[in-house]
Image (cartoon, rainbow, N blue to C red):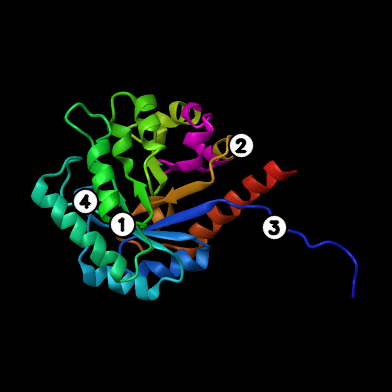
Amino acid sequence: MTSGSATTPAPSALLEVAVLGPRDVAGALEGGADRLELAVPTDGVGLSPEPALVSAVCREAEVPVRVVLRLDDSFTTTGGEFARLVGLGDTYVGLGAEGVVFGFLDRDLEVDVDTCLALAEKLQHVPWTFSDAVDAVLEPRRAWRRLTGLPGLDAVKSGGSPQGLDVGYDDLLALAADPDVARVLMPAAGLAAEHVPWFVRVGVRQFHLGPQARPGGSPKAYVDAALVRSWRLLLDDAVAATQR
């Protein structure tokens, strides 16, 4: 029996990759993705996919899959739409999805806590991500305070502004100085390599890749394992640097 103590690997960052179908899954997995997000892009908006597509992706995936619950390009919903979203959520989970993605705002462009709570309660014990609807709110600090206490919520996709991190980086990094925000923040739209070390330093441990995972950023190109791997290494190195 040899002497010495066991070592525990330093915690790394969760890397989520957006996929559009089963043909994207291999590249995401080979590159080191920890989780997949599935939506159908329509006019630049990710909408809820058909159950058959969810089933096909979940069969290929060896990591958790979260599926978008959104029926149109607005951030609101009606009673009939809400019932349909609940049904879709139940169906997606039954097909193998680990969680869902949704986000609602009210007419004053504030987080619609009541609707989010109602959907989360209907999908009990299903983890969820608040969508980039948060980037459209008028009072970001108030919105984040409302979000961080919602049950089941463990990620918030954000680019810091409707134009993404090209515009919203400084404001989002300042918000992430709050540990409650850093705990759930998942930088997404417009994420660039130079942003990563700074987010990691304030405690952010979730990151989302969309166009960054595809050659030329084109939705017509499949997720590329080499591109995903470059981000995987970047995140791991950034986290490791905080442990030294």
Callout 3: SS? loop
Q: Residue furthest left?
A: 80
Seen from the viewer's position, the closer of residues 142 and 234 is 142
Is mark 2 in CB contact (under 8 Å) with mark 3? no
Q: Residues within 10 Å of mark 1 (few under 14, many from 20)?
A: some
* Position of residue 193 in the picture relative to residue 74 (left or right): right
Viewed as shown, does residue 107 lie left or right of 117? left
Name the residue beneath numbered marker 2: 201
Tell me the kind of residue under disc 1: Pro
Picture disc at residue 70: 4
Alpha carbon separation for disc pair 2 and 1: 31 Å
Tell me the amino acid under the disc marked 2: Arg
Mark 4 or mark 2, earlier in chain = 4
The mark total stands at 4
What range is drawn magenta here?
A: 174-197
Residue shown at 71%/44% (left/top)? 243
Earlier residue among tags 1 and 3 = 3
Secondary structure type for disc 1: loop
